[in-house]
Amino acid sequence: MKSLEYIEVIKNKIDKIFIEQREILNKIEDIVADSISKGYTVDIFGCGHSHIFAEETFYRAGGLACVNPILEPVLMLHEGAEKSSKLERMNYLGEIIYDNFNLRKGDVLFVFSTSGRNPVSIDFAIKAKNNGLTTVAITSLKYSNAYSSKHVSGKKLYEVVDYYIDNMCDVGDASISIDGLKVKIGPTSTIIGAAIINSIFIDVAERLVTKGVDVPVFMSGNIDGSDEFNKNLINKYRPLIKML
């Protein structure tokens, strides 16, 4: 069954990521833990389907309360899928969007883009880095290096950030070939990206606990007593996080 092949592909990629990139993951986790301990937020940005990671990590049961999602409607699919694809290829638009969100020097910004070639994500990352944020890309080196950049600088996302994690997705993202089907099926970037960012946050929480820092984690709203528990976190981070 091709579905089992798909699951095996994902498992193999995740295993490789966490074995081969353990050193850089540890480095990023140290930086994120230090930033949170000083009262900063973790900002998440992506265009198209990559915006999913901002939603995945925001206001999430069992997730960090200090996540600041950069959710720009024109770059998401619900206001027009084709339009969003065209807009993310526009140079300098990312700089304008950056100014509409509350990002601070000292924050850590994760930018998700599997192809790593579209200008909005690159411009957003460049502006964040220039403003004193630590920037981290979650991208595919194989995909990024298969085609030229659409950014005016000619650079890919992984070339403009402080750190990057290779999600090891295939060119085009889809991973499974079926005889008689002209294109591959079965994208892997969402499952792998969610595994990467949630695993980072888990290790960050462990580091903070070890240091005696109170870790801001939301409780499920369906657990008795969660409303009051979560309200305290909301009140703490609402001045910093626009979407709360």
Image: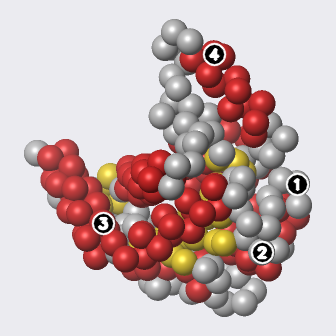
Residue at the farthest bottom position:
154
Residue 183 image position (x, y, % from top left) = 34, 61
Q: Quadrant of the N terminus?
A: top left
Bin the neighbour count of mark 4 within 10 Å (Cα to Cα): few under 14, some 14-19, many 20 and up: some
Identify the residue at image location x=52%, y=49%: 212
Label 4 sits on a secondary structure element that is helix
* Quarter of the image where one finds residue 216: top right
Which of discs 3 and 4 lies nearer the camera? The answer is 4
Point out the tag, 3 or 2, that comes first from the N-terminus. Answer: 3
Q: Position of residue 82 (x, y in %)?
A: 66, 52
Q: Earlier in the sequence, mark 1 or mark 2?
A: 1
Q: Is residue 94 above or below residue 155?
A: above
Mark found first going from the N terminus, 3 or 4: 3
- In this rendering, would 226 be left or right of 132? left
Tag 4–tag 2 contact (CB < 8 Å) = no
Q: List the residue tagged with mark 3.
A: 18
Q: Which residue is mark 2?
A: 132
What element does badge 1 sit on? Answer: loop
Of 241 and 100, nearer the camera is 241
Can you identify the residue that label 1 sits on?
100
